[in-house]
Amino acid sequence: MSEFLLKAAEWEQVTPESAGWRYLFFGVRNGSFSSETGDAEVALVPLSGNCRVEADGRPWELGGRDSVFDGMPWALYLPRDTVYRVEGDAEIAICGARCERRREPVLVTPEEVEIEVRGAGNATRQINHIVKPEFAAERLLVVEVFTPSGNWSSYPPHKHDEDNPPGEVVLEEVYYYRTQRPEAFAVQRLYSSRHGVDDTVTVRDGDLMLVPYGYHTTAAAHGYDLYYLNALAGDRRSMAAADDPDLAWIRRAWADIEPDPRVPLVR
């Protein structure tokens, strides 16, 4: 078992202390609950269902998709030092990052989420940009990724563990996986010669992968589309990453290959 893979029934929340990094939090909660952001900025992303969120004396309604495969996301950005209450039947991903400055809450609607079709051939996938580098946050970044069955994602393998802007910045990251069927699976590889790591693991619905460093890539098993939610945090508002130099040539080859017509999977 990889020390970086947290199986679905064996984790509740990732904190900087539990992950051994500086900024990033991640958790998933169901139904109604009360909480506070503390010293972190937070993005609430409903995975399914509907909810009403009250914070700072204001209400927001968000959600509405039956599952992550059935619609575009909503999100609510809440600043640090905020007490909030969630009411409803939603399953919600809570993405957070420690920060210094308190900003204003922001509701992100499905119409505001940018869809990017990335890659070509059997490395085509859909990126839903929820909290982009241009978003008025301090450290937090959030994207959803849909990978059609049999396709590769996060490919070529890339890393973001060295501060070398604009080509690469340091980012802590989690991959939270969802599938449409319990028997579905995907394969995740994380490797770094500098850190002495080369892990290839099977991931299933509800599993979570920590990516503190190293090159990483994912492949969806044939017959089942794959969803994962990436939450990231770092000192720079950038998602710049460095490709594995042995595999970077693949990007140039995409110029002669059409994107997979199944993408976008969700609109």
Image: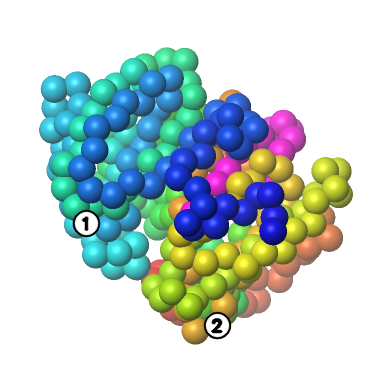
Q: Is residue 170 visible?
A: yes
Label annotation for residue 49: 1
Q: Quadrant of residue 173?
A: top right
Taking the image as shown, residue 35 lies to the left or right of residue 87, namely right
Q: Secondary structure at mark 1?
A: loop
In percent of the image, x 67 and y 41: which residue is there? 212
Question: Residue 166 colored magenta?
Answer: yes
Q: Quadrant of the N terminus?
A: bottom right
The answer to whether 117 is drawn above or below residue 158 in the figure is below
Q: Residue at x 32, y 55 (%)?
A: 47
Front residue of this view, candidates 38 and 69? 38
Q: Amino acid at mark 1?
A: Gly
Q: Is residue 205 above or below residue 62?
A: below
- Type of the residue with mark 2: His
Q: Quadrant of residue 60?
A: top left
* Mark identifier at residue 222: 2
Magenta stretch bounds: 159-176
Q: Position of residue 78 (x, y in %)?
A: 31, 29
Of residues 98 and 72, the one drawn nearer to the viewer in this rendering: 98
